Image (cartoon, rainbow, N blue to C red):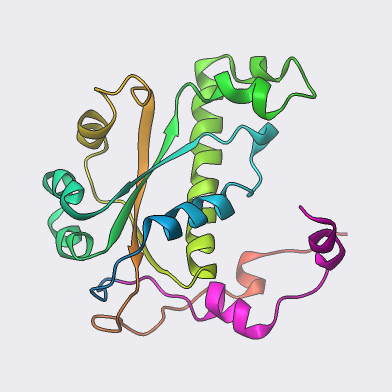
Amino acid sequence: MSELALADRHKTLPDHALDQIFRGARTFYTWEDKDVSDTTIQALYDLLKYGPTSANNSPARFIFLKGAAKERLKPFLIPSNVDKTMSAPVTAIVAWDWEFHQKVPELFPHDPGAKEWFASDDARKANGVRNGTLQGAYLILAARALGLDCGPMSGFDNAKVDEEFFASDPKMKHWRSNFLVNIGYGTTEKLFPRLPRLSFDEAARILK
């Protein structure tokens, strides 16, 4: 983070920015016929990577599918997810790497023993899924911040997606799919009214 960014970190973002990222943002199902450039996808990753994870372990991995590559995904989607996915400019497979701990010495160098925190299968799975899911959420927020719309979803065969996209590549054979995010410029077609959210009193407590 630059010195300028550090100095400004306690300022509340203006309402229009908060609306874009949170209050006015929606889950989209239909899309403009408008490309999301590779440059924009790279900028998206370069934002989301700064979100915090345990010991900076950064277990999430991302495959961004465009064009014909999405056809490989189609057979593994539940029927209600096919049209919205095939029409989206980009579909991201949000995955996590079973071998993420191998990168911990590089990502968390000030504790030489940190890699061992994730040595057991249970620790790797718990941290991989938890922190990988966090990074998937950072992807959604980063996309909205860049003026993109998202449609996150499950509803697909994880095992078959892993076999299709990861198993044959030595660099990806330990990746495990988590969820999907359609990305593009959404249209209001099929957009229903915003659903209710729980109030503070229903979902939160302040303890002193």
Considering only vertical position in the picture, is 96 above or below 34? above
On screen, 143 above or below 165? below
Q: Quadrant of residue 9?
A: bottom right
Residue 42 position, x and y percent, is: 47, 52
* Horizontal relation, residue 141 to residue 56: left or right: left
Q: How many marks?
A: 0
Magenta stretch encompasses residue 115: no
At x 49%, y 56%, the residue is 44
**Left or right: 68, with 101 as reference point:** left
Q: Which stretch did the figure color magenta?
A: 1-28
- Residue positioned 41% across, 78% down in the render: 195
Task: Locate residue 14, reporting x and y percent.
Answer: 69, 82
Residue 3 lies within the magenta run: yes
120 lies left or right of 106? left
| Residue 73 location (% of width, % of height) | 18, 46
The residue shown at (58%, 46%) is 49
Seen in the picture, residue 134 relative to 97 is either above or below; the reply is: below
Residue at image location 38% in from the left, 55% down from the top: 38
Closest to the observer, 109 or 59: 109
Q: Is residue 115 above or below residue 48?
A: above
Q: Quadrant of the C terminus?
A: bottom right
Of 60 and 1, nearer the camera is: 1
Quadrant for residue 119, please give it: top right
